Amino acid sequence: MKTSRAARRVRPPGRTLRMIVGLATVVALAACGPGVAANTGGSGEPRSGGDITFLIDSLGDTWIPNNSAISSFQGHIWGHLTDKLVYVDEKGEVSPWIAESWEQNTTATEFTLHLRKGVTFSDKTPVDAAAVLANLDIWAKGDATRGINPIGLFPKTYDHAEVVDPATVKVFFKAPTLGFIPTLGYHGSILVSPKTIALPAAQQADLANDLGSGPFVLSSWKEGDSVVLKKREDYNWAPAALKHQGAAYLDSITYKLVAQPSVRTSAVQSGQADVAYNPSPQELKSFSDQGFTTATPRYLGFVNGFAVNTRIAPFDDVKVRQALQHGIDRKEIISTVYTEDWLAPQSLFQSNVPGATDHSADFAFDAAKSDGLLDEAGWVKGADGVRAKDGKPLELMLYANPYLATSKSVDELIAQQLGKIGFKVNIQAFDVVTYGERVKIGSPSVAAYEVTRSFIDAGIVAGVLTDANKGENWFGLGQTDQKLVQLASSVASAESVDARAPLLDELQGHVLQQGYFVPLTQIVQRIYLQSPKLQGVSYNGIAYANYYAAWLG
Amino acid sequence: MNRDYARYALRRVLQAIVVILLAYVFTFVVISVLPGDPVTNTLRNPQNGFTEEEIARIVSYYGLDRPVYEQLWDSLSRLLVGDLGISLRSGLPVGRLIGDVLGSTLLLAGSALVVALVLAFAIGFGTRYLPKRYGQGLLRAFPSLFLSVPNFVIGLVLINVFAFQLGLFRVIDSEGGLATFFAAIALGIPVSAQVAEVLIANLDHEAGQEYASVARSRGLGQTGLFLRHLLKPSALPVVTVVALTVGELLGGAVITEQIFGRTGIGSLVERSVTTQDLPVLQAVVTLAAVIFVVVNLVADLAYPLLDPRVRLGGAKPRDKAEVAR
């Protein structure tokens, strides 16, 4: 009796302990492996109906169309709410959309756009010449008196546009602008109702007032939380390139902000959502092993790489710049930081850009060659492995680009690789705000600016490589490199794509041979993890997923 | 007492107004000295490729290139007519932004407070009711444990177990009933620690008083003693602590809302801080100051009415912290 009572008294703490241990185990197990959703994907015929949820890490800042359309996040929503004049696919091929056809004069200074008839905005106002004209004007000039920006990268040579008849617009430029037509398929060139354009900025900032002509219309939205789109039943003007006509298959798309990357991917794995945006590259393989679809579309643009400021010593010496190019092992970057879905660069342009040519030999990894170049340039290796010349160490400061999540890991690897050839590399990582303030192209403290920039037409290079026409002057050369100046200006003023191709090729070769640009890898800035049930997704030239022709299997 | 009380109340109200105005100005100054602003930051996104000239033109439209004191004066004069301004980040009126999310945060904070109180009183009761040899020691360790486990860890574990494993709620439907309940648990647990600490200390103190010994000697059981004699005097200081946890609840909401994907004041603050959206931050800090000050004011003003032992006696009101101890 006595013993049993004592035993009973002792038991409870034991039980509590066991319970705690048990609970802890459950929690630990639960935390380890999120449930694996069944792989029920399969082929079959597209079917109508169904709703998808897209988990996104941010919904950007403002919804004023001009000020927001360039955002990596809001572009997803604009792509479904609005149409563009032309469609640009992932290979950079331009095809008709709202503009059924177009002509240009021989000098590429005048373009005539013929518009598709019967297209309407969701408020039923027609997408006619007057509406297109209003859009062109606001894209090109913005409206500083209302706080509305011009759209980024719209040709600065734009002069004006004229309505010829309700279905024809004529556009005039001050100088040859071959890039005009492709630019109409870029992020920012979204057609919105003239009524929206006329609204004050504070009202345009309310997404409910931003009306487009796209296959989806706004159902509801909550700032910083979600945007719900529903299909537009009478939509009937999709680009032929998407291989589907009429209304979208899906009934609705919900874009929901979930800041935690692990919550986004776990939600897709557990079947609570259909798409997770921007999972970490290293996790992709395990997702596809589990039967999920992953997509790493490349955008058209510059590869990820460094623009070297030639005004900063020792990078004023071409041998030091070339040593930098040959000292980076791109294969190791891809196998360490990324997966085999990432491609090694062939030029300063992504290889899917029309006009990009293979110049990989000019900057191939060759540590011995780098060592030789640095020896020739007079940089002597010291006892600590760091080279020095006239008592100054061979130093390089890298600023990790906050717009690319993997940038810091890549920089750390590069620091090791360059360390082997005698560089002392320091890395500085800032948040977006501080980065924008401190790290600018051409600043005397930034010897290597990490480029992540998309564009639709390679003609853009003319505006960034030198300081001609208020160009960005990426390499700090100004007008000093006559060959570059001449190549850039002839690319800018080229009157046809065929005439421009050899010039572009020569330009890429020159920039890379001179070591002005140090390519790292081809860039993938938008990564998708997707339920296997979701099919028929297409990606455009700026790597946005388009769900117009998508359906749930 | 009445005249004293009125003077005391008036002084506290005036103090409260000064605190709120100072919070408004202080936020402005702190954010203004930081480099950068949302307008410039968006324009500087390398994807845009804008020239310095284009950037300067837009920045001047927002008046961000004017001297700080002029901007502060504008901001203050707007506040006096009740205009909170336009968010620099989203371009929407600040009043609308806050109005849209305030309800969600109040619901979360309110539920978390309920969770915290239930937990704290359960722990408090347990420390008296459970026999000393086991339950007590363990329960007394709970508040320190609750305080030391970070809020976001609790949140992530709850989501993993209850949303992804058991499927009780969907992370997408973050404002749903069960989702709110679990978010409230994540937020309420650390808050309960502070309440429980004070409650336990007071229960111990009251249990050592003569009246408790008398009650016990008259054969009153633990439960009866707790409910009838110890609870009320021990719970009064909790009023003060609860008022102080308002800050904890608002601060914790930033993280909890982030983890659970809720849109509330917390996530609005997070977005506004990272983009330096000055008008929104000013409004939110001021709102937090108003809530904090009002709740504490109500607690202070109610205290003398609730507890007859607290007299305002002529000069100064007794420090409420003293009572709590």
Image (cartoon, helix red, strand yellow):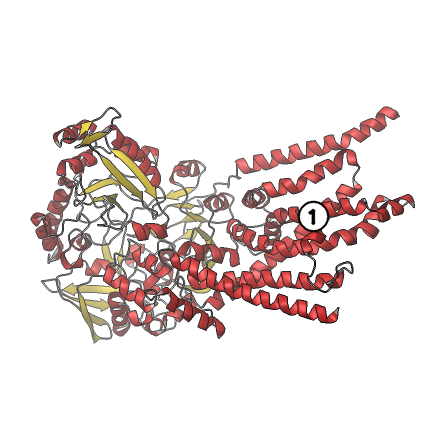
Image quadrant assignment for residue A287: top left
Q: Residues within 10 Å of mark 1 (few under 14, many from 20)?
A: many
- Asked whether residue A222 is in view, the answer is no
Residue lying at the far right in this picture: please name it. B218
Q: Quadrant of the N terminus of chain B?
A: bottom right
Q: Position of residue B13 (x, y in %)?
A: 61, 68
The answer to whether B72 is drawn above or below residue A165 in the figure is above
In this rendered view, identify the residue nearer to me: A392 or A496. Answer: A392
* Identity of the residue drawn at 69% across and 31% down: A18
Q: Position of residue A175 (x, y in %)?
A: 12, 63
In this rendered view, identify the residue nearer to me: B184 or A392. Answer: A392
Residue on which disc 1 sits = B198
Q: Secondary structure at mark 1?
A: helix
Q: Position of residue A219 (x, y in %)?
A: 46, 64
The answer to whether A213 is drawn above or below residue A26 in the figure is below
* Chain letter for mark 1: B
The amino acid sitting under disc 1 is: Val
